[in-house]
Amino acid sequence: MSQSIEQVLLNIAVNLNAHQPTYQHYQKLLDALQQVLPCDASALFILDDAQNLVPVAINGLSMAVLGRKFAPHENPRLEMIMQSRLPVRFPENSSLPDPFDGLLSEDDEGSIDVHSCMGCSLYVEEALVGVLTIDALASGAFKKVTDETIATFAALAAGIVRNISLFDALEKANHQQRSINQLLIDEARDKGGKLVGVSPQIVQLRNSIKMVSQSNYAVLISGETGTGKELVAHEVHAQSRRSDKPMVYVNCAALPESIAESELFGHVKGAFTGANSNRAGKFELADGGTIFLDEIGELPILLQAKLLRVIQQGEVQRVGADHNSFIDVRIIAATNRDLHKEVEEQRFRSDLFHRLNVFPIHVPPLREREGDIAVLVGHILDRIRSQFQIKTLHLHPRALTLLEKQPWLGNVRELEHSLMRAGLHAVQDQDELIKPQHFTSEFVDIPKRQHSSQSSLMMPNEPIALRQAVETYQKQLIEHALKKNDGVWAKAAKFLQVDRGNLYKLGKKLGL
């Protein structure tokens, strides 16, 4: 022996901390074992999910061993080792078949008549993780090898298997999380859709987006409900240098005041009742990327002050924490309110407004976009044909004229919903043209639709699913409340006498 057992064990411990490929850690353990034990062959197995033993490192055996799996019930010696917590020594005259007969690297005869054989199971706490085997051609080779020595190597082997398994699991989880993050980024881009239109107003809007995207300036997007403020936010992020990082969405109107601070800034375990673990807030999740604060005008005054501190100092403090964390986040905010007026009436902090309003972008209402109705109709009909899985569905010229007369207080969103409903009516009529009579909303100059299936939603004459009827009415009622209240969810909730957060969740469920 060129080295003492103590020196070999120290080398193994040092190697455990070295950054090496998995197989090298396994192989170095067997190399060390060969230095201190009189063996001609050794093998390290790990247990796979099917409870087969898979060789991960060998010495003195044919490389063919590494290509095999060893089922315990077909290899009684390996099965005996697995069933014992202590090292197992096999008699030299044992009749049990040896799993390595014919597989010694220097064996030309294809069989071994007499040799010494022993092995030890590998346990991590109470879990069997593998097996270590050693073989020698000489008779009685292991008489002077104590069980403690074998058990020590087995414990080291089990520790290596455990550490590598944990490392591999972390690597897999990290890879999976990166894949999920990328998928979420891609889905957010796809879900965001695109700005459609050829009007001068849309051309100017695209130019503004292109101008500000490459900077890190805060952007404040204003515009009526349904104009596409979220699309603008997605475009700014997609064209920025942060496009490979997440854009975290926050709807300030749907944040319950009781947990809003925790949602935005996170909390530590025990900070309040129900805080059972540490949790990162939206700002930390957006670190390196973009945070989109939709309906920023709905944010309570108290939270406005804390948001201002985050913007000014570039750091967040979790609820209950005694230290701050630095973050690098680009802020995009959107509102359908007149924040100048909100500031004058002291409902919005002026200092926060000026911090957010570094680069303002106004999204024009649909009624001010010259010639975009027809372009939008073509784009929306493509989606309707795909959704209904039909090849042909077009808009009648008279219907287009009708659409171009409407005020569209709900803007592009209202146009989209109206077209989808009319498209469904046309499909039910087996009509390839969406005609004026297929529109059933509060449009002007709409002829009455002559069809037996058309009846009042409140009192239908034909069979209809109750849930579908209720959801349709709920959707129309919420749309009506939003129109009555300038698209402000808080006012719509008051109009309908429901909680603001619950109304927003219902609206989101119904596609509003």
Image (tube, helix red, strand yellow):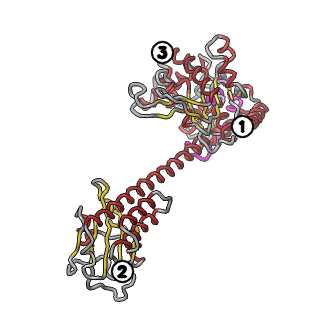
- Residue placed under numbered mark 3 in the picture: 497
Numbered tag placed on residue 245 in the rendering: none
- Residue placed under numbered mark 1 in the picture: 213
2 vs 1, front mark: 2
Q: Furthest residue to the top? A: 345
Q: Quadrant of residue 468?
A: top left
Residue 163: where, in percent of width, then height? 40, 55
3 vs 2, front mark: 2
Instruction: Tell me which residue sits at (52%, 30%) in the image.
Output: 323
Instruction: Tell me which residue sits at (53%, 49%) in the image.
Output: 179
- Residue placed under numbered mark 2 in the picture: 103
Gap between marks 2 and 1 measured at Cα: 65 Å
The amino acid type, in three-letter code, at marker 2 is Leu
Gap between marks 3 and 1 measured at Cα: 41 Å
Gap between marks 3 and 2 measured at Cα: 81 Å
Q: Earlier in the sequence, mark 3 or mark 1?
A: 1
The amino acid type, in three-letter code, at marker 1 is Ser
* Residue 406 visible in the shown view: no
Q: Earlier in the sequence, mark 2 or mark 1?
A: 2
Which of the two residues, 158 or 197, is positioned nearer the viewer here? 158
In magenta stretch: residue 409: yes
Instruction: Tell me which residue sits at (47%, 30%) in the image.
Output: 267
Q: Does 133 sit left or right of 184 as displayed?
A: left
Q: Earlier in the sequence, mark 3 or mark 2?
A: 2
How many C-alpha atoms fall within 10 Å of the one at disc 3: few (<14), some, or many (≥20)?
Answer: few
Which of the two residues, 408 or 301, is positioned nearer the viewer here? 301
In magenta stretch: residue 363: no
Q: Secondary structure at mark 2?
A: loop
The amino acid type, in three-letter code, at marker 3 is Gln
Highlighted range, magenta: 386-415
In the image, residue 220 above or below residue 338 = below
